[in-house]
Every structure is written in C-alpha cells, then in structure tokens.
Image (spheres, coloured by chain):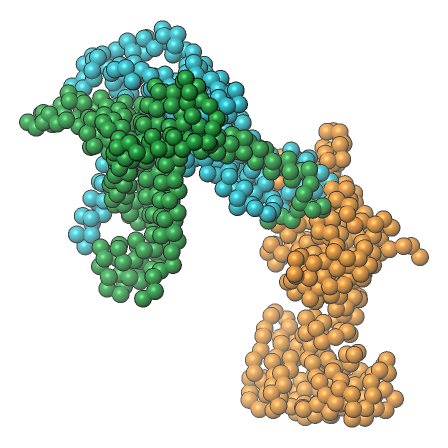
Amino acid sequence: MTSPLVTFDGVVKRFGDFTAVQRLDLTIDAGEFVAIMGPSGCGKTTTLRMLAGLDQPSEGTIHIDGQLMNNVGPHKRDTPLVWQSLALFPFLNARENVEFGLKMRNQGAKERRDKAMDWLERLGVAEFSERNVETLSGGQRQRVALARSLVTEPRLLLLDEPLSALDAHLVIRMQSVLTRLQRELGITFVYVTHSQSEAFAMADRVVIMSNGEIAQVGLPRDIYREPANQFVAEFVGRNNIIIGNITGNENGNLAIQAPDGLFTVTDYERVKNVNDEATFVIAADLVTVSRTPAESENTVSCTLISEEFIGSVVTLFLETKQGTEFKVQLQERELITLDHTAGGAFYLSWKTADAHLLPG
Amino acid sequence: MIVQRLINWSLRGYVLLLFVFIFSPILFSVVFSFNSARFPTIPLESFTLHWYKTIWNDPDVWTAARNSLIVSACTSVLATFLGFCTAYSDYRYNFRFKSAYLALVLLPPTIPLIIMALAMLAWFSKIGASGQLWSIIIAHSVLTAPFAMAIIRLRLNQMDKDLESAAWNLGASEWRTMREVILPFCKPAIISALFLTAAVSFDEFAIAWFVSGLNKTIPVLILEIVQGNIDPQVNAIGTFVFLVSMTLVIVAQIFFTLRAGKMMS
Amino acid sequence: MPQPSTRNTFNGFALTWRMPIIVWQVLFFVGPLLFMVAMSFFLVKNYRMVEAFEFKNWEKMLTRGYFWDSYALTFILATLSTIVASVLAFPASFALAFKVSPVVRRWALFLLIIPFFTSYLVRIFSWYVILAESGVVNSILAQIGLGPYTMLNTMFGTLVGYMTLTLPLVVVLQTFALANIDRNLVQAAHNLGCSPIRAIYTVIMPLAKTGLIVAALFCFILSFGDFVSPYYLGGSKPPTLPILIIDTTKSGQQWPRAAVVAVVMMLTLITIAFASLALAYRKRASR
C-alpha cells in the first residue's frame, strides 16, 4: 500500500460568518483522476484553493505527499492550477506564459524555451508560440493554459472548471486531451466541475459535495446507479424517487407501500425493518413504458405531461393520479413503436433488481 | 419636428461656442507670440520671431526651464511611486480605517493651492527645508500623487482577479509577482501617470512661487514678468509651455487608452 | 478582490505598499495644514515669528473692516461664478450627454480635460490682452461701431477668468452626471406626455442632482481659492481673500495673519462642502 498523495483531515474553512467547507475528510491516491462535483456554493472551489494554498483551512490538516501543507504559501507548493478564467498573462505571448513557472524556478533561458516549446508542441499549439495570448481562440488559450501548468512536471494538477467557457464540441475534444494526458503522465488530477458529463466521462473517482460537505465519494458508475442519499439521487442523473412505508420484509425483500402503490425493493445491507420509512430510486433509463398494463412486480399508471428530445435519447415526463412525477428515458426509435401522441394511460414498470434503496 | 431639429442644431452651435471660449486664450497666445506688435490686437501686425529670440537669449528663462524640468521629472517619479503603492494597497487589501486612508490620499487637490502654498511655506521654514528645488518637488508630489493613484487604480480594475493568484500558483512569491505580473500589467498606466503628473507639476505656480525661494520655475517666471507689465515674450514662453503640457497630456492619454497586450508584442 | 494570500494582512509586503503614502501625507500634507492652524496663534516680534498661543492675529484680522469686505467680495464672486458656470455649462453638457454620438462625446471630454493641465496663468495673460481697452474684443466691436468697453479691472473680467478656470471641469462633471441617467426614465417621461423642456427639470435634473451639485461645489472651491483672475483681470480692488494671503505673506512677513485668513477660508469651504454634499445625497423629500 502506498500512502495517499493528498489527505484532508477534518478540514473546515470559514470566511467570517460563512462556512464554506464544513468538515472534509478525503484521501486522493497518486495517479488518480478525481472529480469534485456539486452545485455552485457547495465548497468545491474552496477545497481546490486550499490544495493550492490560496486559502488556508480554519481547522484540520492537509497533507500532500506526507507533508503538512497548512501555512505553506501558494508559491512554495508545486500544485499548478488551471483557472476557470485561464488567467493567462495578457502582457506575455503564449511561449512566455508557458515559461513563467520555469522562470520562477530560475531555470536558464534556453532550457525554459525548449521545455515550453515541447509542451506547446505536445498540446498542438506550437505554431502560436509567439502570438499574443489575447489573439488566440478559446480552445487555443485553453491548451496554452494547460501547457503552462504542466511544464513544471508537477505530481498534482488542479483544474477549476477549465472547460466551462468552451463551446460544446470543443469540450468533448478537450476531455479526451485531458484524459489522454493524465494517463500518459500518470500524475494526479483534481478536477472541479458542476458538469456531470465532464466528471463521469473523465474521472476515476467522483466526489459529490453539498453545503460544504461530502455527499458521496465513489466510482462514477456507483454514484450513478447507487446514490447514497436523496441529494445525490436528485443531483446526479435522472432518478425517480419514491418514498413509502415498509409493510413487509422477506429475507431483505421489502414491500413498500407508497401513495402510488405497493413496490418491492431489495435491502442488500439488511438495514431496514418493518414500519420504517424507506426511500428508493429507480433510474429513468431503467423504467419500461408501455400502453398496456404490464405483468411486473412494480408498476404504476400515468398520463403523459411532456417530452424532452435531445438527439437519440428522449425523456418523457409523466404524472400519476396522486400527482407524483415520473421520468422515463428511452431511445428515440423506441418512441416510434409507443404511439405516444395518442392520449390515455401509460404503464410504467421496472425490475425489482433495478430499484436502489437509499441507506439511512 | 423642425423645432426639435432647430433646438438640436443650436445646442451643437452652443457647444462649439463654448469650446471657442475655452480655447481662444490658448489660440491667441500662440498667434500673438509670432506678432510684432508690442501691444497685440487685431488687425495683426507683421510676422516675427523676435519674442522667441528674446527668450532664447535670456539666461533667466534657461535657468527656469532647467528648474522646471528637474521639478516636474522628479515630481512625476515620486508621485507615480506613491500613487502606485496606494492604488495597489487599495486594490489588494481591506483594512481598518481604509476610507480615512483614501481620504488622506485624495484630499490634497481639493484644497485651494494658495492655502497649500502658505501651509507648505510655513512648514518647510519650520523644518528648515524651504527655498530649495526639492521643496517644490515634495509639495508637488503631495498634490499630484492622487492623479497617479486614480490612473493606476483604474488599470488594476481591468486586471483578471485570478492573475495575481495564478502567478503565486506557478511559484512566484508576492515580491516576484509584483515584479513579473502587477508592474508589467500596470505599465501603460504607470507611464500615463508619469506624464500626467509631470504636466500638472510643470504648470503649477502658486505653491512653486511660495516655496521656491530663488529657484524660479517657468510658471513662477511668467508670474513675475506678468506682474510688471504687458510683455509679449510671455506669449512666446506661454506657447512653449502649452506645447510641453499638451504633449505630456496627449502622451498620457495615449498610454491610458492603450491595452497592455498591444504594446508588448 | 483577491484574498490576501496566506498570512494575515499585517505583513511586511502589505505594509511596504501601505506605508509610503501615510508617512508622506502625514509629513507633508497633514503636518503643514496643522502647523498653519497653529501658526495663526503665533506672534510676530521684530519681524520674527515667535511660537505662542495668542488670539492677537485673530482679533486683528476679524475686527478689521477690510477683512470682512474681502470676505464678502470673495464669497459673492465665488457664488456668482458657481451660478454662471453651472448655467453656462448646462446646455453644453446636455448636448454632449444626449445629442451627440459617443465618439464625439469622448473627443469633446478629452479636449475639455486638456485646459485643466495647461497653464492657467498664460491663459489669463492672454485674456488680459484680448479684453484690454484696445484689445481684440474692442477692435472687433469697433468695426461695427461699438465700444470701447472697459472689461479689465471689473467684475466681468474676474468672471471671464473664473470661467476659464472652471467651465471645462464643470462641463465634464455635468456631462458625466447626465450621461449616467437611465435613458428609459427620460423616455418614460416623454411617453407620459411630459414636454422635452419640462422633462429637463422634472426628470433629468433631479436624477442628475448629485453630479450637478458636485460640479458646482468644485467650481465654488476653485473660484474661492483663485488669486490670478481677481488680481490680473479684476484689478484686486478690494483684494479677495487669496490676494490678502499673498499680500500679507509676501510683503508684510505677517505669516500668522495670513494663516488666519487661510483658516477662515478652509472653514468656509468645509462648511460649504458638507452642506452641498448633504444636499446632493439627501433622500428625496417625503411628500
């Protein structure tokens, strides 16, 4: 077992009366790609800034590579950050921007120049090396900013919503550039974002934060399929959330009475008892929809409220008699067979195995 | 809508008239400096360079010009330094009594020059620093530092708020960041401030007159010539003074509007 | 605002940038002004100033008729200058704010800033020549059979000088005040049947009130403290307060008495400034 590269231990950050980070315990291993995700104001950027030394924890400790980093100035750590605003120096050209970190380490002019050109080359922007950064396009500036952060060959790279200013098609391109770089260099990326698709597409591990606390840490797939709590269930993906009372328990197979009917959910961890309140989620893409009543353990009937078409995937928004909203995701070509434009009832059903009971 | 048009055009005419009023003394001063009449009026007499020759051969004018040059050059450096320190403090830090601090910096130009002149004269005599060129320089730096501060502060406002942190993040200490990032970013504003404070200092006469002792600057020389009688060589000196001030102000303006990116590459 | 990096704000780096101006202003701005106030209580014996705390200078100055004549004249001239400059500037500022393109406005403002940084002294001398008995204005008037008029050594001459000093600044400040008004409000007023002229004083002037008052305040301060115009164009009979300061300082060596005049001027200006700023920032009167 190697020791973790980064350890947050009981870290609290207050700005005056406002507590940005409540209590953070987190370890990040060397070579990991960790995404920290959450709505704005959840403390994710503060967490990143504390890693960079731009903010200091009010309580708790941060270790990087086994060394206590509290009160180590930002310039004395090797934790380059790729800024949301990019923060390129407007009075320097692209190459001089990349050289900046090397110059601060007092490397010779020739060496600096060679390394900077190498990195610009590697990121495909060598031809713009002598251009003023303000004349470059968004994507080019992005690559210069990346080169500037990587040129010192750090063990840890911090990224603060670096793709948020880019066009959608460039985001996909830059995602693959980032993942490829991370694999090739084997360095640790800590990536802050509010975008689920960016986090899930790139990260080995995702940290979901809410109100200055960690809501869940896990593999992207686990977070998507097995949210730990209602916040994650609502924040991630399109989940249907059902709350009811447990009326029966047979070897962990719970019978749950909800306003819209009786449902079965498996309690693998055996944490629930009869008469407890239980919340379970069923992902929108795991719900089957048909025009005829389905033969299944879990079924509800609904009327269609609206639909959302985003290319190959369609989301249907439906409502039960009790007014509960259901979301169903299906392929566009499946929709054709459904005859969904006609009125009348829709029958939703799902397998018990696909329903996920929220612990706690 | 004919009435509306008429109003609009008369308003524009009025603006023009106002500009004529504001600029006619400058214009006439230049015209009369080339006019042979001892007491210039319209119609003009013949063209002459006599007044310029007179001042060219006047050692007093040369001494005063030298003094003015030293005073405005030193003032501008000193005032721009003070202005920069203050602008950066205001930009970067919040601290107790900050509004009092800013008031202390920005108040001098609102106090009548004649009062400042008397106060400076008395104070410099008290501390044994009167009658020197650097007495003027110190007084002028107090007067002009707020202008430098304002120009540089506006420039700092345009800076990406992450730029300074980005430099620390890349391994630059606060001092190194100052040298490598803040100063280069503020360079156009600093140059602009240098020229503008030089222009203000170059034209200031009340304080200079009170504290200069025997070291006359150009404006003080003009003041003394004018006190005597009508002497058209004032027009020649005046034209020269206008030329210098205008140049300084225009250069300041050019650097003020210039964006940092354009001047480097 | 970027956060102070690591340590608290009370570090060497922060102080390096904060201290120079404090030291400088205390030594060479607050120091001189306080010393001047103290000096007004000093005595002059055998042409030498003696540090003391006596009210002699105050008695001497405040009981003299000529001091109060000067005070009244200076106050009246500055008030008159403020009114005339505000009135003369307003149509021009209005035109620059509402009737011209932004490009023209920028150029106009730039041109108006130039005089502020060029020699006031030379411009006044120029007016002296232009306004003289046989000067430019009278020569032109003579062509159409008028004049000659005496303009130098009159209140008119002084006002021309004051306008040279203050008009550019007043126009600039007024234009800023007017240009910052929300155009929609003006259009709303027109839309509600308010005539353009009425809109000026029912909508535009109240909205730009603060800026207009600040412009007037600067005009008052500049005129009140100026000695060049009343001296060269106004003939300085009787002298205004700034001329009184010069005469007392330069000829009589009576610095303490000059300090009395200066302190009275400062008190007057502080009162005026506070009063007009209170007026400028006052919430609209309740109806």
In the image: residue B139, left or right of residue B52: right
Residue in front for this viewpoint, A326 or C259: C259
Q: Is residue B189 above or below residue B211?
A: below
From the rendered image, report the letter of the chain displayed in green: C
Quadrant of res B221: top left
Q: Residue at x 43, y 11 (%)?
A: B63
Q: Is residue A226 left or right of residue B246?
A: right
Q: Residue furthest right?
A: A1
Q: Residue at x 70, y 67 (%)?
A: A210
**Percent coordinates x, y for residue C50 in the rendering:** 46, 23
Q: Colour of chain B?
A: cyan
Q: Taking A90 as reference, is A160 above or below it?
A: below
Residue B217 visible in this rendered orientation of the protein: no
User: Residue C126: x percent and y percent?
Assistant: 26, 23
Tell me where residue A293 appears, x and y as whole percent. 68, 93
User: Measuring 39% from the left and 40% from the top, which residue is drawn there?
Assistant: C267
Front one among A98 and A270? A270
Q: Quadrant of the C terminus of chain C?
A: bottom left
Query: Residue A30 vs residue A329: left or right?
Result: right
Residue C279 visible in the picture = yes
**Residue B212 image point, x, y percent:** 44, 19
Which color was chain A given? Answer: orange
From the viewer's perspective, is residue B60 above or below residue A50? above
The residue closer to the viewer here, B263 or B77, is B77
Q: How many marks?
A: 0
Who's the residue at 83% across and 91% down the image? A249
